[in-house]
Each structure stands twice: as structure tokens, then as C-alpha cells.
Image (spheres, grey):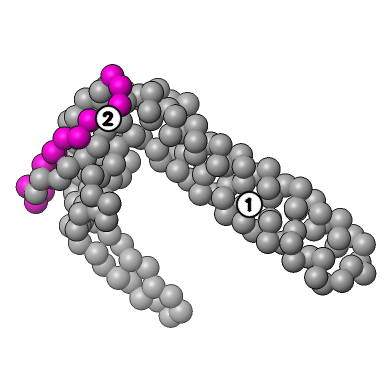
């Protein structure tokens, strides 16, 4: 794992504009951000609540910055979730392959291994995604603040 520095690596992103591009069958949305640093040092233990001002719109947002130890524990929790999903998905995938090799298995025998494979892969993907994006910084409001996000760029 990468050791955290004295300051967070994520940045405060203020949404500057969204552009929707429509194609024949689908559409994509391109979001442009204005990025600001979070100049709050990591505390030695626990977490620190501070107010950070946005660089482009000058609004003030409360953030929580976790200590290096707490950040490490959260990363390990996400890694554990990934491993749990992999442990669930691997044997059920092997069972699906074995049932397929038998050829004449009734369709109801596929349901439980298929559900376990899909849920295990979903849990593994979520765990891996948050493992790689965890930096120990959160916006203090549960629902987020309109037009502001945390981004790693």
C-alpha cells in the first residue's frame, strides 16, 4: 500500500459544466471540473473536521480528514471485501463449469451457483474500486454538496 503523505492526495472538484453528447443509440455526459487542493494536514490519530474553501466558487465546505492509521484500516477493510467476494465467486464459478461439463444437469441446479458468482463478483469489484480510491478524506455532509466532489487527478 502507498503510505499517505502529510496532506491528502485527493482534491476538491467543483463542477464547472456538463455537456451531453447524443449518439445514435446512446449518449455520454462530459463533466468539467475545477480542482482545488485540500490544505488540511492529517492528524496523528482519529480524524479532523475542517472547513475548506472551493477555489472557483469560493463556497466553504466541511471535510473530514482521517489519520494515516485509520486510512490504512479502511484500505484493509476494502481489501478484505474484495477477497471475500473472490472467495465466494471462485468456487461457485468452478461449480458452474462442472455443471456445464455434465451436460444434462437440470436448470434449477444452476441458480444458486450463478447467484453466488454474480454477487461475489459484484462484491469483489466494489471492494477493489474503493481500495484503489481510498485516501481518507470525506465530505462531511452525507448527501454531498451541490456541485462538489472529491477527485484524484
Is 100 or 50 nearer to us in this picture? 50
Tell me where residue 79 appears, x and y as whole percent: 53, 36
Tell me where residue 55 appears, x and y as whole percent: 11, 44
Q: Nearer the viewer, mark 1 or mark 2?
A: 2
Q: Does 105 appear above or below 152?
A: below
Q: Which residue is mark 1?
A: 120
Tell me where residue 82 appears, x and y as whole percent: 57, 42
Horizontally, is 128 left or right of 44 in the view? right
Of the image marks 1 and 2, the number of the one nearer the N terminus: 2
Residue 38 painted magenta:
no
- Tell me what residue is drawn at x 74 percent, y 62 percent: 112
Q: Does 41 appear above or below 110?
A: above
The magenta segment is 44-58
- Tell me what residue is drawn at x 45 percent, y 33 percent: 75
Rate crowding at label 2 as few (under 14), some (14 to 19) or many (20 or more) other CA atoms within 10 Å.
some
- Tell me what residue is drawn at x 39 percent, y 73 percent: 27
Tell me where residue 121 appears, x and y as whole percent: 62, 52
Q: Which residue is mark 2?
A: 47
Check the image and name the residue furthest to the top: 44
Horizontally, is 40 left or right of 2 in the view? left
Q: Which quadrant of the structure image shows residue 101?
A: bottom right
Amino acid at each position: 500500500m502507498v503510505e499517505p503523505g502529510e496532506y491528502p492526495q485527493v482534491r476538491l472538484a467543483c463542477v464547472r459544466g456538463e455537456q451531453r453528447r447524443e449518439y445514435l443509440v446512446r449518449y455520454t455526459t462530459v463533466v468539467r471540473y475545477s480542482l482545488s487542493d485540500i490544505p488540511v494536514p492529517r492528524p496523528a490519530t482519529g480524524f479532523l473536521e475542517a472547513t475548506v474553501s472551493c477555489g472557483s466558487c469560493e463556497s466553504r465546505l466541511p471535510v473530514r480528514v482521517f489519520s494515516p492509521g485509520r486510512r490504512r484500516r479502511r484500505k484493509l477493510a476494502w481489501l478484505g471485501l474484495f477477497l471475500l467476494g473472490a472467495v465466494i465467486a471462485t468456487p461457485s464459478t468452478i461449480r458452474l463449469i462442472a455443471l456445464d461439463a455434465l451436460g444434462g444437469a437440470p436448470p434449477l441446479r444452476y441458480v444458486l451457483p450463478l447467484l453466488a458468482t454474480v454477487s461475489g463478483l459484484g462484491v469483489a469489484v466494489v471492494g477493489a474500486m474503493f481500495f484503489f480510491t481510498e485516501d481518507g478524506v470525506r465530505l462531511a455532509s452525507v448527501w454531498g454538496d451541490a456541485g462538489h466532489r472529491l477527485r484524484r487527478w
